[in-house]
Amino acid sequence: MALDPKKHAMPVQDPQVRAHNFSEVALGYTHEMAIDEAKRCLNCKNRPCVQGCPVNISIPDFINCLKQDDIEGAYNVINKSSSLPAVCGRVCPQETQCESKCTLGIKFEPVGIGRLERFVADWHNANCKEAPKKVASNGHRVAIVGSGPSGLTCAGDLAKAGFKVTVYEALHTEGGVLVYGIPEFRLPKAIVAKEVDTLKQLGVEFVTNAVIGKTLTIDELFEQGNEAVFVGSGAGLPNFMNIPGESLKGVYSANEFLTRSNLMKSFRDKCDTPIMKGGKVVVVGGGNVAMDAARTALRLGAEKVYIVYRRSMTELPARREEVEHAEEEGIQFELLRNPVEILGYHNPDNPRDEKNGFVTGCKVIKMELGEPDAKGRRRPVPVEGSEYVLDCDTVVIAIGTSPNPLIKSTTKGLEVNAHGGIIVNEDGLTSRANVYAGGDAVTGAATVISAMGAGKVAAKAIIDSFK
């Protein structure tokens, strides 16, 4: 049979339908599609795809199991390296990682590795009811700060090695950024809950509403008998542009906007969580978070959504698939544009006017690309006299986040860099003995899979330290 040069397309909801609901956009491969896609794998001896995976999944081995219709065998291969396969299959940027290394991709489209991982994980979750077996205790205790991807990964690897693990989560639901940051239409919360339940079955304990640095300190975690601590507290401190009007009503950080919708369920009609709905929305930024915020605003009833980004489509950092989905849904891209002021309503004759202080527009300036910056990207330069106003009722700032300074300010001997990221060595060890860190708390906002990779590195170092 001739090799298909193209990967199987992912079935998706119709754009005009999905733009008005929060159901998952991508519907997943059918059984037949998954087997056919697996057969496109060349089973290379040098396994370049594995080198592109931050958690080193044995990709050819799981795909080989899938070729033979041994789906549970494929899941077992993935599970040796990843505690969150159903999550990774949905949100990891495979196109710049494992699939970018695929040998088939030299001449044709690479194997749809992420789509196959999702299929395998979903099949296992739907068909395997047997609980994972707990490992005999090795007598050691470790505390994990944060239940995002780095914390969950570290917890899973430690539990599989026999450690007693307790995960402390600041919010009321486990999952960190996976539940508060990524919308339901891209990552259903039931998927995250299932992955968390698997860790609980392995013996991992979760404590919610526990703000480390307030409820408990790192020192107190050690006093409770923990022999090591892993800090995976993420990067929840939003960045702003420091332009006039950012304090107006109707201006959100993307963190707040998405948390109100994803975690606090403001999209439900009977929910009391306040959020701006309808009208015209401007989202500032070009990453995945900006795409999530824009597409969420559309589903909340916005009549028009703009994405304002200061570079061109070529430099847009969001996943290409998410950009295409946004375009299909009718979101308008205002590229080579940058906000200079957020405008608001003010009635000097009536201080009690209910419209006072609310957003009425976003003034932007046209940009052109100049010389490359330190990262090699051409620096955007303002075009003098090119300002104009986008009429809007809501502005969402999605230009990145920084690590929260709470843990640093309450933990002696913990060194951070100029951006607030915790400084670690190659094993994830901080400047404080037996305190490890990884994920966005170290790097600032990055991908789910890179955070998972950091959690694995730290888990291995902790395990090795007790040998």
Image: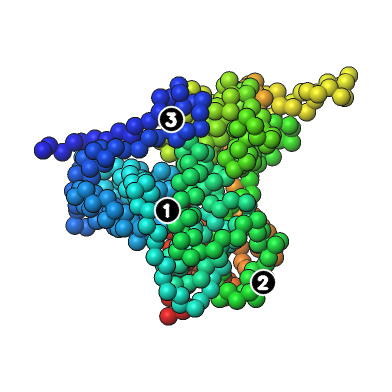
Q: Which residue is mark 1?
A: 84
First in sequence: mark 1 vs mark 2: 1
Residue at the (34%, 32%) spot, across then down: 11
Instruction: Tell me how far mark 1 sits from mark 2, CA to CA.
Output: 29 Å
State how many labels appear: 3
**Pick the front one: 337 or 274:** 274
In the image, residue 245 lies at what x, y percent?
73, 32
Res 95 visible = yes
First in sequence: mark 3 vs mark 2: 2
In the image, residue 240 lies at what x, y percent?
65, 41
Q: Residue 206 falls in which quadrant of the image?
A: bottom right
Residue at the (27%, 50%) spot, across then down: 71
First in sequence: mark 1 vs mark 3: 1
- Look at the image and tell me in which quarter the C terminus lies: bottom left
Residue 137 higher or lower than 208, as above or below: below
**Pick the front one: 312 or 349:** 349
Instruction: Tell me how far mark 1 sits from mark 3, CA to CA.
Output: 24 Å
Q: Is residue 109 left or right of residue 163?
A: left
Tell me the crowding category of disc 3: few under 14, some 14 to 19, or many 20 or more residues within 10 angstroms, Cα based.
some
In the rendered image, the residue lying farthest to the bottom is 467
- The nearer-to-camera label among 3 and 2 is 2
Q: Which mark is residue 298?
A: none
Q: Which residue is mark 3?
A: 325
Res 337 visible = no
Which residue type does callout 3 highlight? Answer: His
Residue at the (63%, 35%) spot, across then down: 266
Q: Which residue is mark 2?
A: 220
Which residue type does callout 2 highlight? Answer: Glu
Q: Residue 227 falls in which quadrant of the image?
A: bottom right
